[in-house]
Image: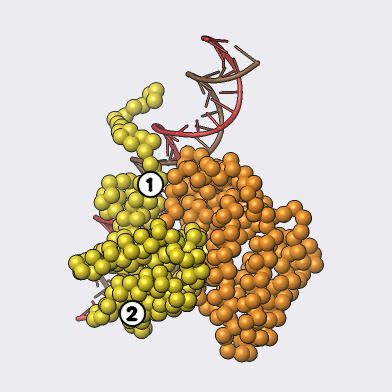
Chain colours: A yellow, B orange, C red, D brown
Amino acid sequence: MTTAAPAKPARRTPLARTGAPRGSAESRIVRSIGEAIADRRLPPGTKLTEESLAEAFGVSRERVRKVLLLLAQRRVVTLIPNRGAFVAKPSPKEAREVFEARRVIERAIMERLERLPRPLSDDMLEKLRGHGALEDAAELAADRKAMIRLSGQFHLLLAEFAGNATLAGILTDLIDRSSLAIAAFERRSSHTCSADDHRRLIAALIGNRPGEATALMIEHLDEVERQLDLEAKTDTRIDLKAIFADEPETA
Amino acid sequence: MTTAAPAKPARRTPLARTGAPRGSAESRIVRSIGEAIADRRLPPGTKLTEESLAEAFGVSRERVRKVLLLLAQRRVVTLIPNRGAFVAKPSPKEAREVFEARRVIERAIMERLERLPRPLSDDMLEKLRGHGALEDAAELAADRKAMIRLSGQFHLLLAEFAGNATLAGILTDLIDRSSLAIAAFERRSSHTCSADDHRRLIAALIGNRPGEATALMIEHLDEVERQLDLEAKTDTRIDLKAIFADEPETA
DNA sequence: GCCTCCGGAATTGTGCACAATCTGCGCGGT
DNA sequence: ACCGCGCAGATTGTGCACAATTCCGGAGGC
């Protein structure tokens, strides 16, 4: 204050949502971008300019910057120093690794679910059936985006039932990265989307024939991976840049 | 890192390691803090003031802020809005989940290692034996910090041998969180630190008796967890705050 | 014709100043 | 004496200005 008040500030912070959920603003954007990537509105390799995103979400550039940092650590976007943020384009190797990691984790989850006391709780049954219905509806309506989103949610739902939030959290990231891999390597032709697999899985889980649900899950994941074209021929351009740039945070 | 000179005259990016200097500064700090937490120089619940850290590492406060955000997403520190960053203090539930997640992942890793063609490559054998020697030396010298660090590295080494960088990355986080759990729940008394377990594990791996190494790994992890005191009695203070504060980024 | 070099524009990176919020402590009222 | 209120100091949160870097296009030389 005091001296020197050259017309410059005049910012008013409209207190509209003063103490409002600060943190949630960021996670909202993270979710939003994450979904956009998952259902392929943002294909791998897309440049994510800070200012564009800031404008799109109506927030400041630093907010976006923070979000991008978060997404980068989840390997959903790739941050290249002085170059910017790009929707991650996994290598075939990484794609295979992600699916293998999923098999490892989801097998464990299924084994846990199969060990649950029977019959399953009404809550679980209802959620399973409800979800099945949603997937059926999406398939019937040929709503591709909904199907993708629901497919991810299905796996996450099972993870929650297993009661290990830590594993579920890890799986969340892996599912996002799967979506990315699918977007990057999906074959033009076939895509017998997995709603049917899910149906059988639900039935096996309810029916409780030992080992069957687990086997179906593994087979399901194998099938999804098998539908990808993971043979060489990677568009080396972006990948090389991403590889040779020092990754900001990889552990 | 002698100078903290704010002066920044004519930086020349000595290309020593390409575009690395920027990003690596942060990951250096992340590693540094991570290690300090792992070997208990920073016990759970410790307040991490931004400015103190900035001064300690000779960097600006925003750099520290970024690092804290990264560590927060790895669940190594807890970020409470307008309150600051604290070394995470896992709940007993979370501790159990982390160990279970480790069992899931490390079992898979061991099964993969056991499936490796025999004899193991010279490179692997050398690294295994070399690491064993280091652990022996640390145990002999009663160098607790070294033992903790080496113990984590051992598990990570096995993960690398398994050839799935994605799983290894996930395990890295879980190991850090294990250290945290151990720091939080270690019993005063016993701590037959696991160097002996590791020795047996190495032997089993080299010897290649089917299933033995995997079984030893599971038993090892069980044993480490069993040595913790995970009964209620949680210091609710910090945990409650962490729980009720809206978490910035949890997925 | 092609390659190289050199601006100009756009984009990212960083320090800084200030605003918002929380904690601790002392004062005054009941 | 106890409780609540409010002020002061410290700490975190955020926008902004500017520095650094990269990208793109064109002119010039071989």
The amino acid on which the numbered mark 2 sits, given as a three-letter code, is Leu
Please give the residue where the numbered disc 2 appears in the rendered image: A228
Among the 4 quarters of the image, the one containing residue B161: bottom right
Q: Chain of mark 2?
A: A
* Residue B83 visible, this orientation: yes
**Residue drawn at point x = 47 percent, y = 66 percent:** A118
Residue farthest along the bottom direction in this orientation? B118
Among the 4 quarters of the image, the one containing residue A89: bottom left
* Above or below: residue B189 compared with residue B216: above
**Residue drawn at point x = 53 percent, y = 59 percent:** B27
Residue farthest along the right direction in this orientation? B140
Give the SS element for disc 1: helix
Q: Using residue C10 as the reference point, say whether residue A173 is left or right of it.
A: right
**Residue drawn at point x = 33 percent, y = 36 percent:** A17
Q: Are marks 1 and 2 on the same chain?
A: yes
Give the SS element for disc 2: loop
Question: How many numbered discs?
Answer: 2
The amino acid on which the numbered mark 1 sits, given as a three-letter code, is Ser
Please give the residue where the numbered disc 1 appears in the rendered image: A24
Residue A105, image x, y percentages: 48, 70
Gap between marks 1 and 2 measured at Cα = 35 Å
